[in-house]
Image (tube, helix red, strand yellow):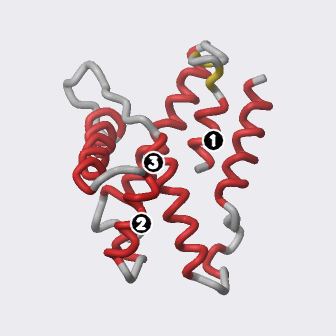
Amino acid sequence: MRNLAYYRAGWGDGALKKKTEFWITVNGNFYDICVLEWCKLFADKNDKHCWLKLIEDKESFKTALLENIDLNENEFENYATSMRKYRDKFVAHLDSEYTAQLPRLEIADKAVEYYYTQLVDLNGKMEFLGTLPRDIIAYKNQCKAAGVEVYS
């Protein structure tokens, strides 16, 4: 969520706020990390952080997740495929494709918000969070504000 907030902070009126090579690279790196991290949570079913490894009632979670992000199961799988393809072809490896299809991050955003909120709700003691934020949306807003300040 932090990287998503910083990525979004770099944009205004449909364009990057700063267009030097440094800021273009920084903003692109924030995007790439968003994709990498999202894939750990939702697209890589064997990853230890994948929701399938941490949520007991998988069917209820999946149903609620899909409802929350307003997709059906097939649409979600297509989205996960697009995230993996971008990660595999342009982030983790540089294949011979010349044009990247950038997945929109709105779905990723909603999915992570939902997953994080569920993990917090499932663990009443909250010790597992350590220094992580209790309210992911407030944290994302705080990070975006910090990013906007830097881009100003």
- Residue 55 position by quadrant: bottom left
Comparing 114 with 89, the one in front is 114
The spot of residue 14 in percent (x, y) is 57, 18
Q: Residues within 10 Å of mark 2 (few under 14, many from 20)?
A: few
Amino acid type for the residue under numbered disc 3: Ala
Task: Please tell me whether mark 3 sits on a helix, a strand or a loop.
Answer: helix
What separation in Å lies between label 2 and label 1 (alpha carbons)? 24 Å
Instruction: Indicate whether 22 appears above or below 92.
Output: above
Q: Can you identify the residue that label 1 sits on?
A: 5
Q: Can you identify the residue that label 2 sits on?
A: 64
The spot of residue 51 in percent (x, y) is 39, 69
Disc nearer the start of the sequence (1/3): 1
Amino acid type for the residue under numbered disc 2: Ala
Q: Can you identify the residue that label 3 sits on?
A: 108
Amino acid type for the residue under numbered disc 1: Ala
- Residue 135 position by quadrant: bottom right
Give the position of the C terminus as an image quadrant.
Answer: top right
